[in-house]
Image: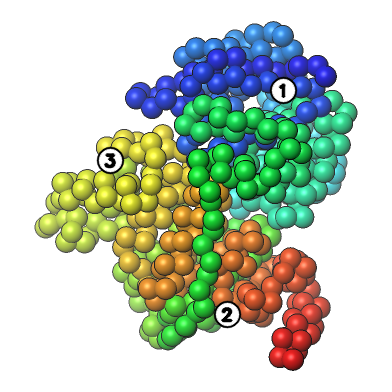
Amino acid sequence: MTRVLELDGITKRFGSTLANDDVSLHLERGEVVALLGENGAGKTTLMSILFGHYTADSGEVRVEGQVLPPGKSRAAIHAGVGMVHQHFALAANLTVLENVMTGTEPLWRLRSNRTAARRRLSDLSERFGLPVDPDARIADLSVGERQRVEILKALYNEARILILDEPTAVLTTQQAERLFSTLREMAAKGLSIIFISHKLHEVMSASDRVVVLRGGRVVAERATRETTKEELAELMVGRAVERPERPPAHPDAVLLEAEDLHLSGKGGAPLNGVTFRLRAGETLGIIGVSGNGQTTLAGVVSGLYPPDRGSLKINGAPLRRHDVPHAIAAGIGRIPEDRHAEGVLGDMATWENVVLERLWSPEFSHRGVVRRGAAREATARLLQDYDVRGAHVDGRVRLLSGGNMQKLILGRVLEAGPSILIAAQPSRGLDEGAIAGVHRRLIEARERGAGVLLISEDLDEVIALSDRIRAIAGGRLSPAIPAERADARLLGLMMAGDWDTARAIEQEAEAAHAL
């Protein structure tokens, strides 16, 4: 095989944090390498150095034997390197087509060949099973749809080396399988691929070789056919990992009641008559393909958007005013889908982000003056209790890895003691150890009597954590089924909107269970 990429002795510090410590790895032509590690292990930093977003303190990157000039993304692109970012690098005010075409035509061309670009984008979209409207503005797309655009943009540039940072985090299982199947076909034709993933089944099915990072260093390298998911999980975190089991539920009074919710024009896909009830001590799972209204639903319930029609009741009383402060005051806590855009203010200090939603609390303010000492002490406890790594009380939140940022948000929400918890994609982009921790916290909240509304595109997560499951398709909710009788086939039918067939299958299972 021909070696197309070499990273040799890469070291990178951010202040006192050693992100990469003398890291070396290589990639052969036509090879698929999976890069594994905990959140904050240095995977994204390493790939950002490769793509020219960061400059290494020492070491070098070579593509087909030629040293890449450090810190120059354009040089990486010209060398045939393409990158799909986990956190989107898209212009929100431009359309999908405009984003994909950006930088692909010379500035002196008098007229852009949009017709050919549209045709090529359409072909890629169909081939990879990544549907998206070329004329839609990025700002109007859901997180899942934006991720599709990122993937299509990289493929549009005809990269010979493709870096994918959590490429399937917002795709359904079927879409992910189709994507990796296509990538394998392209690898067979000479494309070389590095992908970062926390989904061990993807690593096992899609990669030829696995490189494991821990604490910024390469701690293991395995041929995929010679390892197991259990070994990889333990190599990632340095210990055996087991996800918690959900104990039997004991639902109590209705906490949240949504009746005939309609909304169009905000939050992405519309809602078309959504009705559900959430009880204390239960988890209601909402599963669906990205862009079917789940983002809008989370926004309505958490007070971001007032519905066009319909009502929300909390503990039997209508929500007094439909905005975020009143929703929080009524006991609603929210783990948002997009942690960067909605979960934190990246340029504010960690302690400021932690107390942001509770500034009116006597614990953190007195007569309009913020009690900074109390806020810093509470933040220090949270960072320790929730294992938020790389964080400092006075540090900027934007410097955290995605997973540690998620743990910070989780801690902020749960420490407020909400009676209703909206958890939207709570484990997206997390490693196995962090997923187990998040799941344990959600189960603990349910056991304390909170009602948990879990909105996720991860089938395994919804089945593992939910007591009842409903699918959302076209802004409508399916009938609920018990989690014990849910499987991939049944949930796939529900997500596709084929509720009659799904209900018939579920009734057969119910009858068999009764026997």
Instruction: Work out whether residue 417 or residue 500 is closer to the camera in this orientation and state it.
Output: 417
Q: Give me the residue at 50% from left, 79% from top.
A: 249
Q: Mark 1 and mark 3 in contact? Answer it, CB < 8 Å.
A: no
Residue sticking out furthest to the left = 367
Q: Mark 2 and mark 1 in contact? Answer it, CB < 8 Å.
A: no
Q: Residue 275 carries which label?
A: 2
Residue sticking out furthest to the top = 66
Q: Give me the residue at 64% from left, 30% from top.
A: 221
Q: Give me the residue at 68% from left, 32% from top.
A: 222
Q: Name the residue under label 1.
A: 27
Q: Which of marks 2 and 1 is in front?
A: 1
Residue kind at label 3, given as amino acid type: Val
Q: Mark 2 vs mark 1: which is more N-terminal?
A: 1
Is 51 placed left or right of 363 in the picture? right
Give the alpha-carbon distance from disc 1 to disc 3, as whole Å. Answer: 39 Å
| Label 3: which secondary element | loop
Residue kind at label 1, given as amino acid type: Leu
Give the alpha-carbon distance from disc 2 to disc 1, as whole Å. Answer: 51 Å
Quarter holding the N terminus? top right
Q: Mark 2 vs mark 3: which is more N-terminal?
A: 2
Q: Nearer the viewer, mark 2 or mark 3?
A: 3
Q: Up-down: is 395 above or below 259?
A: above
Residue 44's spot in the image, x, y percent? 55, 32
Q: How many marks?
A: 3
Instruction: Work out whether residue 258 or residue 233 is closer to the camera in this orientation and state it.
Output: 233
Q: Name the residue under label 3.
A: 393
Residue 416's spot in the image, x, y percent? 31, 63
Instruction: Work out whether residue 252 or residue 54 is closer to the camera in this orientation and state it.
Output: 252
